Image: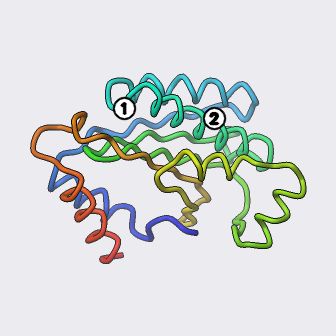
Amino acid sequence: MTGLRSEQVRRAFVSAAFGHLHPVEHRLPHDVASASRSRQLVTDAAKGRLPQARLDELALAVTEVVGNAVRHAPPEPDGKIGLRIEQDPGVLRVPVTDGGPEFRLDGASLKDTLRRDRFGFLIVDALADRWGLALDGKKAVWLEVDVPLDRRPQGTSRSTTRAAATQAKGAS
């Protein structure tokens, strides 16, 4: 699985078509405490955009991704990991970056993960609407959750937001 090849195209298209809330970038220590800090940061940023149960699921998924970055990868050159919170009208997207090398998620990798009692990506898969790896410049694991129609800015809909994402994906 990989992220969109041209994230800038997707972001520019969605921003031009529907408006875009400015992304927020956080640099977190390469430390286990960053998992709970990331949970609070994403909860604060997304409050009001998701029902409470869905917000809790997003926070748990982000906690898993940040925890994996701290446990299984080195930090970025500045000694930290990155947490970015992007809010488009129809979707909340959270990429987490670290200094680790590229890795693959295929059937064999997932079987090995299950044999070693590592269920983080299975939790993310169950809780996120979409997730994957972006390897354009530096490694990032990203996840997305859809924002319910009644919590989107006026004039947006699920079909127009999905159409913009599909069109941007085709342009990459």
Q: Secondary structure at mark 2?
A: helix
Task: Mark 1 or mark 2: name the one nearer the start of the chain.
Answer: 1
Looking at the rendered structure, the kind of residue marked 2 is Thr
Residue 7 marker: none
Q: Name the quadrant containing residue 141.
A: bottom right
Q: Name the quadrant containing residue 8.
A: bottom left
Q: For mark 2, what is the residue?
A: 63
Instruction: Indicate left or right for 60 with 52 as reference.
Output: right
Q: Nearer the viewer, residue 157 or 24?
A: 157
Asked if the residue at tag 2 contacts the one at tag 1, i.e. Cβ–Cβ closer than 8 Å, the answer is no
Residue shown at 39%/62% (left/top)? 7
Q: Is residue 114 above or below residue 84?
A: below
Q: Residues within 10 Å of mark 1 (few under 14, many from 20)?
A: many
Mark 1 vs mark 2: in front: 1
Instruction: Indicate left or right for 21 with 23 as reference.
Output: left
Q: How far across and how far down the image is residue 138, in percent? A: 59, 59
Q: Is residue 93 above or below residue 43?
A: below
Looking at the rendered structure, the kind of residue marked 1 is Leu
Residue shown at 73%/62% (left/top)? 101
Quadrant occupied by the C terminus: bottom left
Q: How far across and how far down the image is residue 79, in percent? A: 71, 39
Q: Nearer the viewer, residue 87 or 77?
A: 87
Q: How far across and how far down the image is residue 5, in percent? A: 44, 71
Q: Residues within 10 Å of mark 2 (few under 14, many from 20)?
A: many
Q: Name the quadrant containing residue 167.
A: bottom left
Q: Residue furthest left?
A: 155
Q: Is residue 68 above or below residue 106?
A: above
Q: How far across and how far down the image is residue 53, in percent? A: 47, 28
Q: For mark 1, what is the residue?
A: 50
Q: Nearer the viewer, residue 111 or 47?
A: 111
Residue shown at 83%/57% (left/top)? 114
